Image (tube, rainbow, N blue to C red):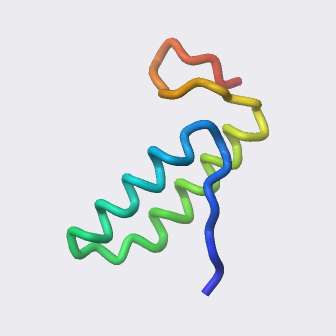
C-alpha cells in the first residue's frame, strides 16, 4: 500500500477529514487518492491560504 501525503497549506485539514471518515467506518481509499491529487494541484499552484472558498484564487 502506497502512503499518500498531503502537502498544501490545507494538509492538516484534509488529513483530519480523512481520519474522521475512516473512524466512522468508511474505508475511504479512492476518495483519499482524489483528495491527494487535488492537494498536489494546490501545492503546485502555491496555494497558501488556510481555507478554500469561492473567493480563493487557485488558477
Q: Image point 28% across, 73% down: which residue?
A: 26
Q: Quadrant of residue 18?
A: bottom left
Q: Quadrant of residue 44?
A: top right
Give the image location of residue 4, x and y in percent.
62, 68
Residue shown at the point (72%, 40%) measured from the top left: 43
Query: What residue occupies the far front of the structure in this picture?
Result: 12
Which residue is situated farthest in the top direction here? 55
Picture quarter with the N terminus: bottom right
Task: Answer above or below: position of 52 versus 10.
Answer: above
How far across and how far down the image is residue 11, in percent? 56, 47
Identify the residue at horizontal 69%, vertical 49% (top origin): 40
Q: Position of residue 52 (x, y in %)?
A: 49, 27
* Left or right of 49 in this view: 14: left
- 36 or 49, nearer to the observer: 49
Left or right placement of residue 25 versus residue 22 in this view: left
Give the residue furthest to the left. Answer: 24
Q: How many marks?
A: 0
Q: Is residue 10 above or below residue 4?
A: above
Tell me where residue 17 appears, x and y as whole percent. Answer: 37, 53
Quadrant in which the C terminus is drawn: top right
Q: Residue at x 62, y 47 (%)?
A: 39
User: In front here: 33 or 21?
Assistant: 21
Quick check: 56 above or below 7? Answer: above
Amino acid at each position: 500500500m502506497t502512503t499518500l501525503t498531503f502537502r498544501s497549506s490545507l494538509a492538516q485539514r484534509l488529513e483530519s477529514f480523512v481520519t474522521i471518515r475512516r473512524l466512522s467506518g468508511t474505508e475511504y481509499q479512492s476518495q483519499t487518492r482524489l483528495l491527494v491529487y487535488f492537494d498536489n494541484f494546490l501545492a503546485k499552484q502555491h496555494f497558501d491560504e488556510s481555507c478554500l472558498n469561492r473567493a480563493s484564487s487557485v488558477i
